Image: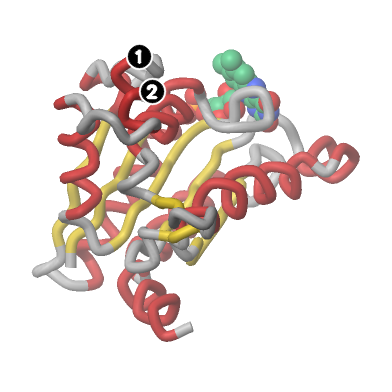
Amino acid sequence: MHALIVFAHPDRASLTHALAARIAAGIVEADRTNTFEIADLSAEGFDPRFTAADISVHMEVATPPADVAREQARIDRADALVLVYPVYWWSMPGVLKGWIDRVFANGWAYAETSDGKLIKRLGHLPVHLVALAGADARTYARHGYFGAMKTQIDHGIFNYCGAPVATSELLMPSGATWDAQLERVQAIGRSLFGAAKAADAA
Ligand SMILES: Cc1cc2nc3c(=O)[nH]c(=O)nc-3n(C[C@H](O)[C@H](O)[C@H](O)COP(=O)(O)O)c2cc1C
């Protein structure tokens, strides 16, 4: 089984990067034949700007630009998709949002029938979300921010495309120790394909 881990943080020495590395470690720990690829959007210089070429894809009058097609092929090769990112303004960083805007394109991630019915194209792709917060649990609870993130990201993006969100974690500085949080995400890596099977069966 193969996982694509999409990582959106400009600093490879960050805690976010350590979380991505621990998920990868867990994936291989569970089964040595498992493989993973890390899409480090900042290091790879993915361009998150939605261009006229992307609009043409959206309007179904052009095929995806090469960089978008490459990312779609990466996802097509994966049995599970993992997104690891810091929370920026109660959502995902712009580079990751732009990756979704451009890569989860009309015609590939979803489509519409001539009578306006939505076709969800990513039902085969279990998704695991790991967001790292700067603010504490009280702030999230007081404003309902995690619920808002789940509505917008888990439901608004992935459910729209039919991709089952198998796990969705928000790690906070006020939660368990960082060692415990790192162990928790390694455990997500270990059970990634077990969880994927469960999501498939649901
Ligand atoms: C531009 C920016 C916006 C941020 N917005 C939020 C936010 O809305 N909520 C939050 O909990 N933390 C926010 N933070 C804090 C980051 O989530 C936190 O610094 C990061 O998760 C720490 O991870 P790292 O050690 O891997 O950098 C923000 C940080 C930056 C740089």
In 3D space, how far apart are the residues under numbered discs 1 and 2 (Cα atoms)? 5 Å
The residue type indicated by label 1 comes to Ala
Measured along the vertical axis of the image, is residue 197 above or below residue 35? Answer: below
Q: Residue at x 49, y 21 (%)?
A: 94
Depth check, front residue: 83 or 201 = 201
Q: Residue at x 18, y 60 (%)?
A: 2
Residue furthest right as drawn:
142
Label drawn at residue 55: 2
Mark 2: give few (<14), some (14-19) or many (20+) Cα within 10 Å: some
Q: Quadrant of residue 26?
A: bottom left
Q: Which residue shows up at 24% across the image and 29% down it?
A: 62
**Visible in this render: residue 12?**
no
Taking depth in this image into account, of 136 and 113 the one nearest to the observer is 113
Identified by mark 2, the residue type is Ile
Point out residue 101 in the picture as x, y percentages from the top left corner: 44, 31
Give the residue number, with chain letter if any, for mark 1.
Answer: 52
